[in-house]
Amino acid sequence: MEIKKKAIAHYEKMIKWAKLQNGNAITDHFFMFETLGEFWQGHFCSYCQEYLKGDLFCSYCSICPLTKNNLNTKYCCYGLWHKMNHSKTWKEWIKYAEKILKLIKKMG
């Protein structure tokens, strides 16, 4: 399966799961991993797997199609992943995850 299809499937799976949670509950990636078997960190992202190459400081993100030509922020997915990662509630997390999914479909 190509990178884009894997990423879309990953985000659709996470979003579907998150929508079953209490939208006002605090996000918990450990709970997502325990019940879903994956979560939103880079080791589950096909783009991170392809472009990050184990570099924890994202020095290769500049060649990732979800970040390249993004001169305004050092964060991947035009800063959306950072916002999703720091979301306090599932409702907020879903909002940013859906924006990342849209970005993947458009630019991936």
Image (cartoon, rainbow, N blue to C red):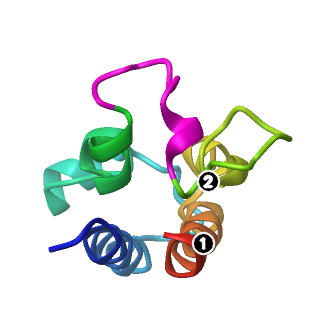
Magenta residue check for 59: yes
- Residue 41: percent from the left, percent from the top? 37, 42
Q: Residue at coordinates 52% horizontally, 58% vertically from top-left?
A: 25
The amino acid pointed to by label 1 is: Leu
Which quadrant is the N terminus positioned in? bottom left
Q: Secondary structure at mark 1?
A: helix
Q: Residue at coordinates 61% horizontally, 53% vertically from top-left?
A: 77
Badge 1 is on which residue? 103
Q: Residue at coordinates 48% horizontally, 50% vertically from top-left?
A: 27
As measured in the structure, the alpha-carbon distance from the residue carrying label 1 to the one carrying label 2 is: 7 Å
Q: Residues within 10 Å of mark 1 (few under 14, many from 20)?
A: some
Badge 2 is on which residue? 77
Q: Secondary structure at mark 2?
A: helix
Q: Residues within 10 Å of mark 2 (few under 14, many from 20)?
A: many
Q: Nearer the viewer, residue 97 or 45?
A: 45
* Magenta stretch: helix, strand or loop mostly: loop
